[in-house]
Image (tube, helix red, strand yellow):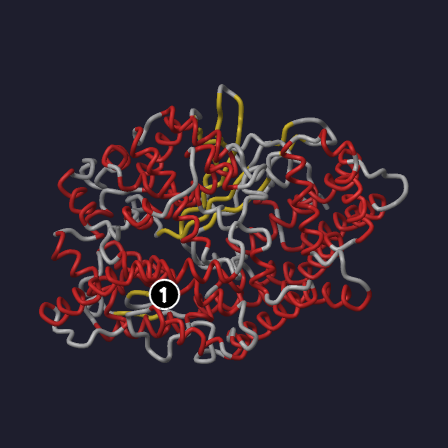
C-alpha cells in the first residue's frame, strides 16, 4: 500500500488520505523518531547544534507534518473512521513529544551547547531557538525525576485525550441540533439564509427550512428573525450545547473538571503556584496579577461606554420593538434594529456588496501593494471541492503557499483559524530552503445556485484576521525552524498581525476595490460606507466587556485552587463583576469555550486584548504615513512579519514603531478615548 502520509512530496495528496493510512504511517514515523532520539542522546552525537539538528530535527519534523495532516483533517473533514484513527494515535503522539521534551539526557546536551564557547558564534535566530529549547525542557518536565516524571508524562497523555473529547463533544452537539422552520417563522430573515435553509431541508427530503447551530445559519436568525419564540429556541439550544442540559454522552462538565484538576497538578509538579504561571512563562505578560490588572483596568475604561450602549438598547427595544424586558435572545435582534434605525443600513444590505471572489481580489491587491509580493492560484490536491490553493511569490520566487477552506459544512469544526502545514526551514539534510505552507479555514455560508457566497462585514473582518496570521507564517525570512513564522512568537503577541489586518476593512479605498454588488456589480456606495463607519464602534463598550469577561474567567479558572469544582460559579462571579447584560441561569457557555479547553488559549485568552494594544498602535503608523504606503508596508513586513519568533515580540514592535506600545490608539479606535 502506498501511504500518502509517508510520501516525501512537497504537498500532501489529501484526496488519497484514508483513515486506514493513519496508524501504519504514524507507527513508522514514530519508530524513526524514537530511534533518532536514542541516537541523539547517545555518545556518538556531540553537544553541537548542527549535529543534534541533523539527527533529531529531520525525523521529528516529518512526524509532525504527517500528524498535522491527520489533525487538520479531523477538524475539517471529520468522519467516525477518521475520528477513531485520530483517537487511536493521539496517545502515542503525545507520549513521544512528552518524552522528548522531558528527556534529561537531551536537555543536558542542549545545556552543554549553551555553555560552550561556540554558543556565542550562533546566529541570533539560533540563540533564540536554543533559549526557547532550554525553557521548554524546564516546562516539559526535564528537571523531574522518578515518580514525578512518570506522573507528569501520564498527565500529558490524559490532558490531550480530554482536550480532544471536549472538541468532539462541541462538534457533535453542534451537528446534532436541527430545527425545521416554516416560512412564516422565518419572517425577517434574509432571503439568502432562507434559501440555504430550504436547500438543506430539501437535501434531506424534509419539509420546511433546516436551521442549525452552525454560525452562518444560527446568527442571521438571532439577528433578523421577528419570531421571538424561534430566537429563544435557537438561543437555548446554542448556549446549552455539550452540557448536562443535553445528551449525557456530549456533556463537557466532567471533562472541564478533570482538565482543570490535572493542569493544577502539572503546575505543582513543575514548581509553579498555579497553571496560569505555567502558561505565562513563555508569554510577554509577566504574572497572572499583571494580566488581571490589565483586564480590570480595561473593563473600568470601557464601562461608561458599555453602560450607555445598554441604556440606548433598552430604551429603543422598549419604545420601538415592544420589548420592555430584554432577554438574551433579543440582544442581537434589538441591536441590529437599533443599528438600522440609527445608521439607516443593515448588515444584510452590506453583505450584497461582498461576494467572496471580489473580496479575495481586493485582499490580495492590498497584500501585493504593501508587501511587494504576488498571489497566484495554483494546483494542489485538496480535501473538499470548495478548497482553493494559492502561491505567494516575490521576484519570481515562491515564498509561501496556502489552502483556503472558506465554507461551513457538516463534519467541520465551527470557527475560523490559521494553522501551519509546513514551516520555513533551511533544511539541515539537503541544505535546501523549505518554504512555508498555511491552512486558512473559515465557516462562511456557501454559494446558493449561481450566486457566489456573500460575506457580512464581520465575516470580511474574520477573513482579513486569519490572513494576517497566514502572512506572519508565510512571509517570514527566518530559516531556523522553531522561530520562523509564527513559531516561537509569544502567544500574547501572535494576534498582532491578525488584528492589524482587520483595520483595512474600515478603509474606503480598500472597501471600494473589494466590493461589487452581487447583481449590479457596482461597488459599495460611499454613503453606505460612511454609515458603516459611523456605526463602527456601535456597542464597542459592551463588546469590550464581553472579551474582558472571557479573559477574567479564563485567568481565574487557572489561578484559583478550587476552580475545578466551581466553573459555573466563577463564571457567574466574573459576570457579576464586569458584565452588564443579564444571562439566563441555564446558559452554559463554558461548555463550548474551546479556546481554553481545546485550543491552546488556556490562561491565555487575555492575549486577544493584549495584542490589540500592539496592533492598534502599529496601525496608527499607517494612519500617519498612508494606509497603502509601500514604504510603511516594507518596514512592517521586515520588522514584524519577516522577523517571526527570532527575537522577542517587544523588540520587533519597537523596531517598527520606534518606541514602546501605548494603549491610546486602541481606546481611540474603539471610540472610548
Q: Residue at x 45, y 62 (%)?
A: 292
Closest to the observer, 600 or 298: 298
Image coords of residue 518 (percent x, y) = 23, 41
Image coords of residue 426 (percent x, y) = 66, 30
Task: Tell whether 30 sits left or right of 330.
Answer: right
Image coords of residue 333 (percent x, y) = 22, 64
Image coords of residue 142 (percent x, y) = 75, 56
Q: Residue at x 33, y 26 (%)?
A: 629
Task: Tell whether 574 sits left or right of 517.
Answer: right
The residue where tag 1 is placed is 212
Local SS, label 1 = loop
Closest to the observer, 165 or 646: 646
Mark 1 burial class by Cα count in 10 Å: few <14, some 14-19, many 20+: many
Residue 234, image quadrant: bottom left
Counting labels gives 1
Tell which residue pokes out farthest to the top in this image: 395
Task: Tell whether 189 sits left or right of 385.
Answer: left
Task: Tell whether 88 sits left or right of 225.
Answer: right
Closest to the observer, 311 or 77: 311
Closest to the observer, 612 or 346: 612
114 relative to 397, above or below? below
Q: Residue at x 60, y 34 (%)?
A: 424
Tell which residue pokes out farthest to the right in this image: 43
552 relative to 484, above or below? below
Amino acid at each position: 500500500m502506498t501511504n500518502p502520509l509517508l510520501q516525501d512530496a512537497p504537498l500532501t495528496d489529501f484526496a488519497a488520505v484514508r483513515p486506514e493510512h493513519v496508524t501504519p504511517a504514524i507507527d513508522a514515523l514514530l519508530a524513526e523518531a524514537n530511534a533518532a532520539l536514542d541516537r541523539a542522546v547517545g555518545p556518538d552525537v556531540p553537544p553541537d547544534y548542527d549535529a543534534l539538528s541533523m539527527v533529531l530535527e529531520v525525523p521529528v519534523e516529518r512526524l509532525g507534518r504527517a500528524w498535522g495532516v491527520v489533525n487538520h483533517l479531523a477538524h475539517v473533514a471529520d468522519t467516525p473512521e477518521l475520528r477513531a484513527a485520530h483517537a487511536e494515535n493521539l496517545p502515542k503522539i503525545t507520549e513521544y513529544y512528552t518524552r522528548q521534551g522531558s528527556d534529561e539526557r537531551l536537555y543536558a546536551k542542549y545545556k552543554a551547547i549553551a555553555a560552550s564557547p561556540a554558543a556565542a558564534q550562533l546566529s541570533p535566530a539560533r540563540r533564540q531557538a536554543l533559549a526557547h529549547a532550554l525553557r521548554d525542557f524546564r516546562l516539559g518536565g526535564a528537571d523531574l525525576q522518578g515518580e514525578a516524571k512518570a506522573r507528569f508524562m501520564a498527565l500529558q497523555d490524559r490532558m490531550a485525550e480530554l482536550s480532544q473529547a471536549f472538541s468532539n463533544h462541541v462538534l457533535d452537539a453542534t451537528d446534532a441540533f436541527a430545527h425545521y422552520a416554516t416560512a412564516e417563522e422565518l419572517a425577517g430573515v434574509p432571503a439568502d439564509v432562507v434559501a440555504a435553509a430550504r436547500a438543506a431541508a430539501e437535501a434531506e427530503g424534509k419539509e420546511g427550512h433546516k436551521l442549525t447551530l452552525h454560525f452562518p445559519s444560527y446568527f442571521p436568525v438571532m439577528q433578523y428573525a421577528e419570531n421571538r419564540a424561534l430566537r429563544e429556541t435557537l438561543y437555548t439550544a446554542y448556549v446549552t450545547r455539550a452540557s448536562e442540559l443535553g445528551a449525557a454522552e456530549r456533556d463537557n462538565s466532567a471533562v472541564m473538571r478533570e482538565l482543570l484538576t490535572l493542569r493544577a497538578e502539572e503546575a505543582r509538579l513543575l514548581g509553579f503556584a498555579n497553571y496560569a504561571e505555567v502558561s505565562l512563562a513563555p508569554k510577554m505578560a509577566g504574572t497572572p496579577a499583571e494580566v488581571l490588572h490589565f483586564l480590570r483596568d480595561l473593563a473600568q475604561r470601557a464601562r461608561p461606554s458599555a453602560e450607555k450602549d445598554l441604556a440606548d438598547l433598552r430604551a429603543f427595544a422598549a419604545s420601538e420593538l415592544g420589548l420592555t424586558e430584554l432577554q438574551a435572545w433579543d440582544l442581537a435582534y434589538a441591536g441590529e434594529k437599533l443599528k438600522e434605525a440609527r445608521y439607516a443600513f443593515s448588515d444584510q444590505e452590506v453583505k450584497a456588496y461582498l461576494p467572496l471572489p471580489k473580496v479575495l481580489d481586493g485582499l490580495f491587491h492590498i497584500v501585493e501593494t504593501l508587501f511587494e509580493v504576488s498571489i497566484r492560484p495554483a494546483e494542489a490536491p485538496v480535501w473538499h471541492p470548495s478548497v482553493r490553493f494559492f502561491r505567494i511569490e516575490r521576484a519570481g520566487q515562491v515564498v509561501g503557499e496556502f489552502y483556503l477552506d472558506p465554507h461551513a459544512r457538516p463534519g467541520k469544526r465551527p470557527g475560523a483559524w490559521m494553522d501551519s502545514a509546513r514551516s520555513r526551514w533551511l533544511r539541515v539534510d539537503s541544505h535546501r530552503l523549505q518554504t512555508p505552507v498555511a491552512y486558512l479555514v473559515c465557516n462562511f455560508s456557501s454559494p446558493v445556485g449561481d450566486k457566489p457566497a456573500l460575506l457580512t462585514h464581520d465575516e470580511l473582518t474574520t477573513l482579513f484576521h486569519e490572513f494576517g496570521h497566514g502572512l506572519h507564517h508565510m512571509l517570514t525570512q527566518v530559516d531556523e525552524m522553531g522561530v520562523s513564522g509564527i513559531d516561537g512568537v509569544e502567544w500574547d503577541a501572535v494576534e498582532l498581525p491578525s488584528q492589524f489586518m482587520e483595520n483595512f476593512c474600515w478603509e474606503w479605498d480598500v472597501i471600494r476595490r473589494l466590493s461589487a454588488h452581487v447583481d449590479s456589480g457596482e461597488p459599495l456606495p460611499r454613503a453606505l460606507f460612511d454609515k458603516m463607519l459611523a456605526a463602527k464602534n456601535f456597542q464597542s463598550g459592551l463588546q469590550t466587556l464581553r472579551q474582558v469577561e472571557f479573559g477574567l474567567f479564563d485567568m481565574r479558572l487557572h489561578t484559583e485552587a478550587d476552580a475545578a469544582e466551581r466553573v459555573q460559579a466563577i463564571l457567574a462571579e466574573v459576570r457579576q463583576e464586569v458584565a452588564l447584560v443579564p444571562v439566563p441561569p441555564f446558559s452554559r457557555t463554558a461548555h463550548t469555550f474551546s479556546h481554553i479547553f481545546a485550543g491552546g488559549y488556556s490562561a491565555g485568552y487575555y492575549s486577544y486584548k493584549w495584542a490589540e494594544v500592539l496592533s492598534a498602535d502599529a496601525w496608527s503608523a499607517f494612519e500617519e504615513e498612508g494606509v497603502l504606503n509601500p514604504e510603511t508596508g516594507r518596514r512592517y513586513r521586515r520588522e514584524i512579519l519577516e522577523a517571526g519568533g527570532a527575537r522577542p515580540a517587544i523588540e520587533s514592535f519597537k523596531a517598527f514603531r520606534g518606541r514602546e506600545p501605548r494603549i491610546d490608539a486602541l481606546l481611540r479606535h474603539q471610540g472610548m478615548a
